[in-house]
Amino acid sequence: MSKNLSKRDAVLLVSENSNFFIENYFGIIKSRAICVPINPALSSNEIKYIIDSLNIKLIFTQNKSNEKIKALNYKDVEIYTDKSELNSSCYEENNNKGAINLKEDVAVILFTSGSTGKPKGVMLTHYNLIYNTNSILEYLKLTKGDRVETVLPFYYCYGTSILHTHFRVGGSLVINNKFMFPQTVVEDINKYNCTGFSGVPSTYQILLRMTNLKDTKLPTLRYITQAGGKLPEIFIKQLIDILKGVDIFIMYGQTEATARLSYLPPNLINEKMNSIGRGIKGTELQVLSSEGNKVKVGETGEVVAQGDNIMKGYFNDKQSTNKVLRKGCLYTGDVAKVDDEGYIYIVAREKNIIKSGGIRISPKEIENVILQIPEVVECAIIGVLDDILGEAVKAFVVLIDNKHSIDFKYILDFCKKQLPSYKIPRYIEFLSTLPKNSSGKILMTKIKQ
């Protein structure tokens, strides 16, 4: 292994959730180099872009991805696979390469899909990781007795945070890479006596509508967490109804904030339905108007965050960094309201707001109505060009199966009973599944294309 790595050098880690990922992730960080974990399913062009951008000279990859990486034909890059002979000395040769400055030195770069098509590298310092992990541990009250069922990939900030928190307290993880068979997730929670489970909205929608979760007792389950987007109210209520005695944490975060920005205490889930809560310990969350003032109750503004979990910036992208980081604050791009106690309610991503006939429409409101139909598993709403209105509402709908009479007219009639005319979808397209990234988040850019 190269002996010339410094704390400014990045090491690529290409792996699905596995012991191989965990050993190398922590090994790279401990060696004082920068760990760059990526999705093995990235295209060759995307992997090449990351290798070139970061001047990668060392790659750890699962054998199944090795051919794809070797085909890129880098002569000066060392590659180790899960079949290579490795020992702990691989990570010790770095120890004299300069002391780590926790607050300044980058530990991890996580790539997010950029709106322009080029992924953006979020630079997280050692202190970002420590700080955010401490805050999450405090409200989840994790101990070494906790065991989490893990379906979220570790190269995604939500998955990484599960890794950090459980290793920090000496807890354990059950890795399930088979979410295409969602019933295995329910079975594994009982099989391995899991105390926790985490998912994004689509995780819970699929578990509630495509498994026997509602008929299964889960005696060891202590808590679940949900982040990565807004889970429609109908599914939150089903979880409350099914998981009696289980703490349900609705959370909010961004990769740019290491992982977590806020949570709603489980005892407030009914009283503050649809709220993301307030800032986690040590993180200040505000909703600001375009003039920079705190919004009044009922007004909308942008969610702005401040704390030691906020990223150092985007790698080699000053323009994008300056757009979201201003005066030490992270401008999230999420539109929200607050109530009289300061609890925050996300309305939409600014870029997803539909402007129809001069009226701003939140897609989530329409999605929540259509998802009340029991045969609907998923729904996504977008605005499409319209000569008269500017944008018209279009719905993409996924049904449990095709053995029922749900059609365009059925959904239209259902919406007419609950929505004003300008919010009723003009177009409805039925899909077998919504396009998602490997974390289970819906790819709105692909839907819009």
Image: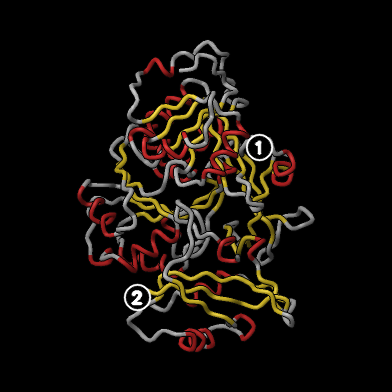
Q: Is residue 261 above or below residue 1?
A: below
Among all residues in the image, which is located at the extreme right? 291
Residue contact at pointers 2 and 1, CB within 8 angstroms: no
Mark 2 and mark 1 lie on one chain; the one further toward the N terminus is 1
Label 2: few (<14), some or many (≥20) within 10 Å? few
Percent across and percent down for residue 411 are 48, 84
Residue at the (38%, 33%) spot, across then down: 22
Q: Is residue 222 above or below residue 71?
A: below
The spot of residue 196 in percent (x, y) is 33, 48
Locate residue 355, reporting x and y percent: 70, 72
> How many angstroms separate mark 2 from mark 1 (CA)?
44 Å
Disc assigned to residue 313: 1
Is residue 130 in sight in this rendering? no
The image shows a total of numbered marks equal to 2
Q: Which residue occupies 36% across, 35% down? A: 63
Rendered position, 312 above or below 383: above
**Amino acid bearing label 2:** Asp
Label annotation for residue 410: none
The amino acid pointed to by label 1 is Gly
Which residue: 43% across, 77% down? 372
Q: Secondary structure at mark 2?
A: loop
Q: Residue at x 45, y 47 (%)?
A: 41
Q: Residue under circle 2?
A: 401
- From the viewer's side, name the closer residue of 272 and 260: 260
Q: Outermost residue toward the left?
A: 191
- Residue 366 found in image quarter: bottom right
